[in-house]
Image (cartoon, rainbow, N blue to C red):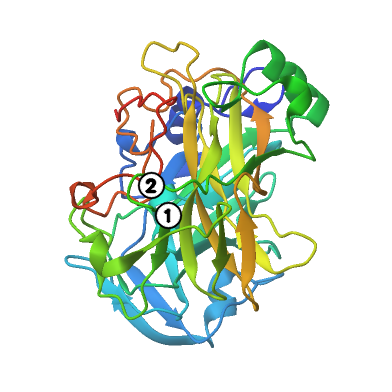
């Protein structure tokens, strides 16, 4: 029986290990690698097969397997060298991990940062649910991942992790007032190398971040995905030539850019973020009232993001943002607030923080491109302001 302390909050790494040992998280005949356990989340793995389906769906009261039965176009073998997933086509992939959550424990899934940066859309589906990526309190059953490559065809295979799971006991969302008070004592958001004054935080059920649209020495602020790009092999790290997949984005006068409808952009936040050890954050997909712009496809920020190896308060790490305009060209300006971080309390502090010996790829990032691309082929990161100190990768 999984033993948890009283209170509410996100389960840290040592409780995730206990959940695996007690069968709350189970992969059957497959062992869950210790390296997949992050400070406040678990990397989920693709199973042995993928189903190409003709459309997406919600299972409602049915099981996922019953709901997908009439939608399958083809079955693909993910073992060995894996398979190529085509752009614009939905695929359903059973994950290796299943859940047997005790009452009071709920779950949330999100794409890994590298998945979002490759413009691969993912969401978890569970039996009997009408909501994506949310795992109900006490859920017992399999997990399925819907995958849709949007910009590039991608190669995937068994055991690849495209998304993450976060478990929480009860509800521990931080209110705006609590977040402002926490920031005043233990800074979360930085600008120009200093904590943003607490009274100047932009809050509305979460903390807003703005865009950095100042050109670097090469005149670039970010990247736009190329059309008709080659295959991106997501099983390989640091090998893809970014020139084949991305074109540079340069600002207009006044530090602004106009987004082309449907195109996918990688940009960087102006503010830098630091996630203290007692908090966990999520970048939520944000649609302004006009509905013309979508920024970020959601993602987890684990405790320790933007904290140096000694745990000292530093100036944080900037956040990479995935941006797409809907139907009309859309202008965005420097420091415009276009994305939002929401926060939850941790049930306990993790044993290890993000970036501390866990293979974290984006600690201290100054480059928006994901881990699959050769960063040595990029002449300079789009944002390397002198006031920010690079923390380096673990």
Q: Position of residue 288 (x, y in %)?
A: 75, 59
Instruction: Examine the rendered structure and indicate whether residue 367 appears above or below residue 81.
Output: above
* CA gap, disc 1 and disc 2: 6 Å
For numbered disc 2, what is the local secondary structure? loop
Location of the C terminus by quadrant is: top left
Instruction: Examine the rendered structure and indicate whether residue 124 appears above or below residue 218.
Output: below
Which residue appears farthest toward the front when viewing the image? Answer: 253
Whether residue 315 appears in this view of the structure is yes
Q: Which residue is mark 2?
A: 382
Q: Position of residue 283 (x, y in %)?
A: 60, 45
Q: Position of residue 303 (x, y in %)?
A: 51, 26
Relative to 275, 185 lies left or right: right
Location of the N terminus by quadrant is: top right
Q: Earlier in the sequence, mark 1 or mark 2?
A: 1
Determine which quarter of the picture holds residue 180: top right
Instruction: Examine the rendered structure and indicate whether residue 90 appears above or below residue 117.
Output: below
Relative to 376, 102 lies left or right: right
Name the mark on residue 222: 1
Residue drawn at point x = 64 percent, y = 38 percent: 102
Residue drawn at point x = 49 percent, y = 57 percent: 251
Q: Are marks 1 and 2 in contact (CB under 8 Å)?
A: yes
């Amino acid at each position: 029986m999984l033993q948890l302390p009283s209170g509410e909050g996100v389960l840290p790494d040592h409780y995730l290990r206990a959940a695996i040992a007690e069968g709350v998280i189970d992969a059957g005949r497959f062992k869950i690698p210790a390296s997949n356990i992050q400070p406040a989340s678990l990397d989920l793995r693709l199973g042995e097969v993928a189903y190409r389906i003709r459309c997406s769906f919600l299972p409602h009261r049915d099981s996922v397997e019953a709901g997908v039965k009439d939608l399958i176009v083809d079955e693909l073998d993910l073992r060995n060298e894996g398979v190529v997933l085509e752009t614009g086509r939905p695929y359903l992939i059973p994950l290796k991990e299943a859940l047997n959550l005790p009452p009071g424990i709920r779950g949330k899934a999100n794409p890994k940062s590298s998945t979002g940066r490759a413009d691969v859309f993912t969401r978890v589906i569970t039996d009997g649910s009408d909501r994506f990526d949310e795992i109900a309190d006490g859920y017992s059953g399999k997990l399925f991942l819907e995958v849709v490559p949007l910009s590039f065809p991608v190669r995937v295979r068994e055991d690849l992790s495209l998304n993450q799971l976060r478990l929480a006991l009860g509800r521990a969302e931080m209110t705006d007032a609590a977040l402002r008070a926490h920031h005043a004592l233990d800074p979360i958001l930085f600008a120009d190398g200093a904590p943003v004054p607490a009274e100047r935080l932009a809050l509305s059920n979460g903390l807003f971040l703005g865009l950095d649209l100042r050109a670097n020495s090469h005149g670039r602020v970010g990247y736009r995905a190329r059309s008709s790009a080659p295959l991106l092999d997501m099983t390989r790290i640091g090998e893809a030539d970014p020139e084949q997949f991305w074109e540079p984005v340069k600002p207009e006068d006044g530090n602004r850019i106009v987004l082309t409808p449907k195109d996918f952009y990688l940009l960087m936040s102006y503010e830098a973020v630091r996630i203290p050890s007692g908090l966990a954050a999520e970048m939520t997909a944000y649609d302004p009232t006009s509905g013309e712009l979508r920024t970020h496809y959601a993602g987890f920020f684990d405790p320790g993001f933007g904290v140096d190896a000694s745990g000292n308060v530093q100036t944080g790490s900037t956040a990479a943002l995935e941006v797409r305009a809907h139907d009309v060209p859309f202008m965005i300006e420097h420091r415009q607030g276009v994305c939002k971080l929401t926060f939850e309390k941790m049930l306990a502090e993790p044993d290890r923080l993000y970036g501390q010996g866990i293979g974290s790829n984006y600690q201290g990032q100054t480059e928006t491109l994901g881990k699959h691309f050769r960063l040595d082929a990029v002449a300079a990161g789009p944002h390397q302001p002198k006031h920010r100190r690079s923390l380096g990768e673990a």
